[in-house]
Amino acid sequence: MDKFKTVLNFANKQTNLGFGLVALLTAGGEQIFSSAVFRCPCSDLNFFYGMVFLLVPALALLLLGYILSKKASKLLTGACRRGAALCRWRRLTAAGAALIQISAAALVAPSSWIAVALLNGNYYECAMTGNNVSVYARHLCGEKNSRVLCQQQLHRFPCGTGSDVPPVDREDVLLRLRAHSQILGWLLIASVMLSNLLLNCVARCTSPISYLQLKFWRAYVQEESNLIDSYSAKHAKELAERNLKSFFGQTPPEVIVTPSSKDWEKISSLYKFSTKGHYYSTLHRYVESWQETDNEMMRMGSVISSEHADDTPAVLGFVDEGRVAL
């Protein structure tokens, strides 16, 4: 799991190649899985066996994408405690927009698995030869002389043995199934690419900031994410060493300032960008709002400090923690 997350973190840093790298790794895994594990039973289990291999790994990859998503963890952590506040329409809209962004990133691996599996054709070929729909079986067997025998022994075709149907007719049926599978695979790829293009176009067109500022924002978010991990680890180590020295030495502990739970909550919520505040994260907003201005008035961030900044606009959500949220 750690190695897999390291690879995805690398993909996260490469914003232009992140989705492509995840898709490539998934495609390679599917090829290995198909050749080393998959064996069509050539029995009444064909349909369920083929569908399980086609869909269940995709479902597992989808769930793994949600599990490894940092944005999903941000959205869910403490949600039950803030249940009443989340019921507001504005918060629900923001949560829905964030869920769409999380799902878009999580769907990369499962859609890649299904697309490559359909192009390969083995799973679909096995599943559809076990289909008990008579109309579909007649369509596959066509008007051949061995039509009735073909329908009866259709489940034996993927194995190539145990069937009395002529090899030419059997190969014709398998070629037709493979063609159906590959057509579905290319349609899925085209649909995913078109959806991604449309979402990116809408996000770019409705963005309230320019391209260069958006590029700077993405760079800032990545650097802040890297630094907060290192600073947190360093501070936790210092606090642990202080406590251990105090315990074993039976001496009063040194003073180490640690942010309060309220402060942690302010910088942990999802961020809403505003051109008025020009802040690039909840941490940036918190630090700027904490300082006093010359007229001794607290500077207000893009979101009122007493509220959670969890209503991220859909048009800019892809900036938060990169294109592949972990």
Image (cartoon, rainbow, N blue to C red):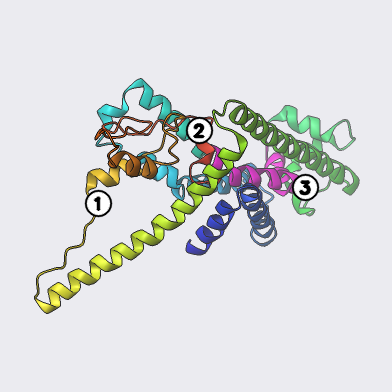
Q: Is residue 79 left or right of residue 69?
A: left
Q: What number is the disc on residue 16?
A: none
State which tag comes first along the sequence, 2 or 3: 2
- Crowding at dot 3, Cα within 10 Å, few <14 / some 14-19 / many 20+, comes out as many
Give coordinates of residue 307: x percent, y percent. Answer: 29, 31
Alpha carbons under labels 2 and 3: distance apart: 42 Å
- Looking at the image, residue 250 lies above or below residue 320: below
Q: What number is the disc on residue 259?
A: 1
Query: Which corner quadrant of the image does residue 190 belong to?
Result: top right
Are the residues flagged by discs 3 and 1 in contact, CB closer than 8 Å? no
- Crowding at dot 1, Cα within 10 Å, few <14 / some 14-19 / many 20+, comes out as few
Which residue shows up at 18% across the image and 75% down it? 245
Type of amino acid at the residue the image marks with label 3: Phe
State which tag comes first along the sequence, 3 or 1: 3
Mark 2 lies on residue: 100
Decide which of 183, 104 is in the foreground and name it: 104
Which residue shows up at 80% across the image and 34% down it? 140
Give coordinates of residue 236: x percent, y percent. Answer: 29, 63
Give coordinates of residue 108: x percent, y percent. Answer: 60, 44
